[in-house]
Image (tube, grey):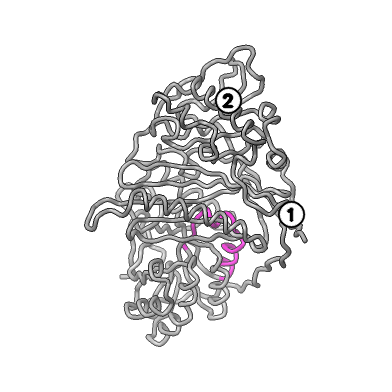
């Protein structure tokens, strides 16, 4: 039996570079920054005619690679599906033995989505660990792994997800991309190459890509690099998708077909050229991208998720009179967030949620509910990158995009920023445009998924003016909250939001760990 789910669909153009922060090493202060805009080569009159966004109007249009540092010219069709039961599974740590943040979608009634997406992300992080290993004890080297996602189609019987992965082993970060597809007719996950009609079609796509890269990207000057990195294998063609016009995007990772300084080359194959090379699933996927429907045909039957009724915010607490302590929750919204909101509503407690933009994008109703119930919503950047490793432009992008998502969900822009990992420096402080909210109590719920241990650590350290770091992405952290609230009450401590604790006279760029 199939579930025909109505969805509200927001469609927008997604820039391939810079917007999600994982397509080029331009924003990594430790990597070289490509600056050229070299022209693409002209084609002969016999080239297959079509129009691309990456060639000069005077050129004969057709299959083309993006010009050097011009990957942003190719646009995916990013969508923001509003589907009952859509959530995110998120995990992160604070840097032991290395910093990582990873998130992937979950959908009630279609467990294959979370199972396959989670398996992919987990395998990438395990590969990162095996390849680079943790730095020696006492080493100043800081490593980071980051994986986030976006929907490139969620319509009819097709779901497409684009993952962006950033790996920083200690010197020279690398950005990777990967698209994962789901055929809802069969209920199975399929690789990117399932869009193509077998090995012969893959070889033809490979030939087109190699020809375009050689012609249009003279900066890819490693001998044999293009032929080796773009040879016709599933591994090399792991990131395929469509533009809103149905053109096929072939995306290569940094270092795959040339030096890392050349970024992530992309080849655009026009819709009419790629049409005979598509499989049945590929044609369905292309059609859904070009003309998305307002429903999603899931293979399982499950009841729609109904949000809990909201309660109006209560009056604030006077922390000059009461012994206040601020509880904060990072990295959501995620699966356990709704359970936490129910619990806090029943207890009449208000907290501050520092939300991650990528998760808030796909759970706006959860963010809206939290705000409606009197909780404070803070900014935790879009995909949890270490801001000290980014350029000022990408720091601004990480913050602004998240504020936009929060405002769209709640009607109000956030006024507080928590930098991921608590990592800040003069550059971050000067760029943030908001007060930086750190913490004075870290019960390490991200490391020890033990509710009793987390509760004990909070209560042993708790005193008036503290800011407590917790994460609503962990079920064990949410399960610790009732005992934490009971223990705080026994100690005469009143849980409040950060703004209630610190007041409104905060300075942009200044870090705050607790109330003075």
- In this view of the protein, which residue sits in the foreground, 20 or 211? 211
Give the extent of the magenta segment. 354-373
Residue closest to the far left: 138
Q: Is residue 436 above or below residue 38?
A: below
Q: CA distance from mark 1 to mark 2?
A: 34 Å
Considering the whole magenta stretch, tell me its main secondary structure: helix
| Nearer the camera: disc 1 or disc 2 | 2
Q: Which residue sits at x=47%, y=40%?
A: 23
Residue 297 disc label: 1
Mark 2 = which residue? 208
Residue 207 spot, x, y in % from top left = 56, 25
| Image location (x, y in percent) of residue 107 | 63, 60
Left or right, 93 with respect to 153, comes to: left
Return the residue nearer the eye: 62 or 319: 62
Which quarter of the figure is the N terminus placed in? bottom right
Quarter where residue 115 is shown: bottom right
């Amino acid at each position: 039996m199939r579930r025909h789910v109505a969805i509200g669909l927001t469609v927008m153009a997604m820039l391939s570079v810079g917007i999600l922060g994982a397509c080029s090493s331009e924003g990594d202060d430790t990597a070289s920054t490509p600056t050229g805009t070299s022209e693409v080569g002209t084609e002969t009159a016999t080239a297959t005619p079509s129009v691309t966004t990456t060639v000069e109007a005077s050129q004969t249009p057709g299959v083309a690679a993006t010009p050097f540092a011009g990957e942003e010219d190719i646009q995916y069709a990013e969508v923001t599906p509003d589907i009952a039961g859509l959530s995110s599974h998120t995990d992160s740590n604070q840097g032991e033995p290395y910093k990582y943040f990873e998130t992937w979608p979950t959908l009630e009634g279609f467990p294959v989505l979370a199972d396959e997406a989670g398996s992919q992300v987990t395998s990438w992080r395990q590969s990162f660990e095996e390849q680079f290993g943790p730095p020696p004890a006492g080493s100043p080297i800081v490593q980071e792994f980051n994986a986030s996602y976006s929907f490139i189609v969620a319509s009819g019987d097709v779901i497409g997800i684009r993952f962006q992965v950033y790996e920083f082993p200690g010197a020279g970060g690398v950005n990777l991309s990967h698209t994962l597809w789901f055929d809802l007719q069969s209920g199975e996950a399929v690789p990117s190459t399932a869009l193509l009609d077998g090995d012969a079609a893959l070889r033809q796509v490979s030939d087109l890509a190699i020809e375009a890269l050689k012609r249009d990207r003279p900066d890819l000057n490693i001998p044999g690099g293009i032929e080796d990195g773009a040879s016709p294998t599933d591994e090399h063609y792991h990131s395929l998708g469509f533009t809103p016009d149905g053109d096929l995007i072939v995306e290569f990772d940094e270092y795959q077909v040339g030096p890392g300084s050349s970024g992530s080359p992309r080849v655009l194959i026009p819709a009419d050229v790629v049409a005979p090379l598509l499989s049945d699933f590929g044609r369905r996927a292309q059609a859904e991208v070009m003309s998305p429907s307002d429903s999603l045909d899931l293979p399982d039957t499950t009841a729609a998720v109904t949000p809990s009724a909201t309660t109006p915010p209560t009056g604030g607490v006077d922390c000059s009179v009461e012994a206040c302590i601020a509880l904060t929750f990072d990295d959501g919204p995620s699966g356990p967030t709704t359970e936490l909101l129910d619990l806090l509503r029943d207890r009449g407690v208000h907290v501050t949620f520092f939300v991650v933009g990528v998760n808030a994008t796909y759970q706006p109703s959860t963010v809206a509910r939290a705000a409606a119930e009197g909780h404070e919503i803070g900014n935790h950047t879009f995909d949890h990158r270490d801001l000290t490793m980014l350029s000022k432009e990408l720091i601004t992008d990480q913050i602004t995009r998240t504020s936009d998502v929060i405002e769209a969900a709640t009607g109000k822009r956030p006024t507080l920023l928590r930098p991921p990992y608590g990592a800040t420096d003069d550059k971050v402080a000067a760029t943030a445009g908001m007060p930086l909210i750190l913490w004075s109590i870290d019960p390490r719920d991200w490391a020890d998924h033990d509710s009793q241990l987390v509760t004990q650590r909070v209560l042993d350290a708790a005193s008036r003016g503290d800011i407590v770091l917790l994460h609503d992405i962990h079920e064990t952290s949410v399960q610790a909250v009732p005992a934490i609230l009971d223990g705080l009450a026994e100690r005469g401590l009143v849980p409040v939001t950060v703004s209630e604790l610190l007041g409104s006279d905060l300075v942009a760029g200044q870090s705050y760990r607790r109330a003075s």
